[in-house]
């Protein structure tokens, strides 16, 4: 088995917390939700060693992430280095076609990729999405417009959907996440 490609991790400070973006030589490979306090900052000397393409991709990533968190569509995305099965790749491609403020069900995604009986597998591919928010798995709802799961946790899913103006079946019974209005 090949060793994983070297990645550079950089932080993106947003009003919702500090995200961590991981870049390979081919593009954005992973995006992590805020988890408590920010990690180590890249110091000036280390930042100078980051290649021009990664600096540029990081600007695209930060701008796109901040736009989505504000409920607006991003103007552009960095190149994405998505590693997954052919099935996962097809799901992630379908997710990128869901416009901001819109949702689809796991079943609709399964039908869109030509695998109508693979509803649970679509859920698994959504959970394995390495670049949540930019690849909008939060826009996928379970049957009857129920929330379903989310790799970043349901508070994040609710937060992102509400920012985009999406209503869903459980909205009336759930409180707005603290600090995410």
Image (tube, helix red, strand yellow):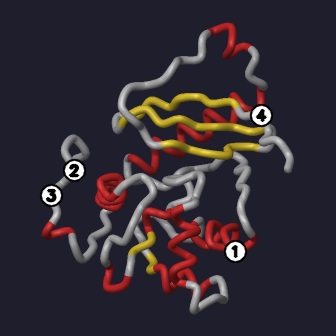
Label 3 neighbour load within 10 Å: few <14, some 14-19, many 20+? few
N-terminal of the two: label 1 or label 2?
Answer: 1
Measured Cα–Cα span from mark 4 to mark 3? 41 Å
Instruction: Please state which of residues 60 and 87 is positioned toward the viewer in this rendering.
Output: 87
N-terminal of the two: label 4 or label 3?
Answer: 4
- At x 75%, y 39%, the residue is 24
Label 2 neighbour load within 10 Å: few <14, some 14-19, many 20+? few
Of tags 1 and 2, the one toward the viewer is 1
Q: Which mark is residue 87?
A: 1
- Circles 2 and 3 in contact, beta carbons < 8 Å: yes
Residue behind mark 2: 177
Secondary structure of the residue carrying numbered label 2 = loop
Q: Quadrant of residue 88?
A: bottom right
Secondary structure of the residue carrying numbered label 4 = loop
Query: Where does the image place residue 110, in percent across and percent down from the top left?
Result: 57, 84
- Circles 4 and 3 in contact, beta carbons < 8 Å: no
Label 1 neighbour load within 10 Å: few <14, some 14-19, many 20+? some
Residue behind mark 3: 175
């Amino acid at each position: 088995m090949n060793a994983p490609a070297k990645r550079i991790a950089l932080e993106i400070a947003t009003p919702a917390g500090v995200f961590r973006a991981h870049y390979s030589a081919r593009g954005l490979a992973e995006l992590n939700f805020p988890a408590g306090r920010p990690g180590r900052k890249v110091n000036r000397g280390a930042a100078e060693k980051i290649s021009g393409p990664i600096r540029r991709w990081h600007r695209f990533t930060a701008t796109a992430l901040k736009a989505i968190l504000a409920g607006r569509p991003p103007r552009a995305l960095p190149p994405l280095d998505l590693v997954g099965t052919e099935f996962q790749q097809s799901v992630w491609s379908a997710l990128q076609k869901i416009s901001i403020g819109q949702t689809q069900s796991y079943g609709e995604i399964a039908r869109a990729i030509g695998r109508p009986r693979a509803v649970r597998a679509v859920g698994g591919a959504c959970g394995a999405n390495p670049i949540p928010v930019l690849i909008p798995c939060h826009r996928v709802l379970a049957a009857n417009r129920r929330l379903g799961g989310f790799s970043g946790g349901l508070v994040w899913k609710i937060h992102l959907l509400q920012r985009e103006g999406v209503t869903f079946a459980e909205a009336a019974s759930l409180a707005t996440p603290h600090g995410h209005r």
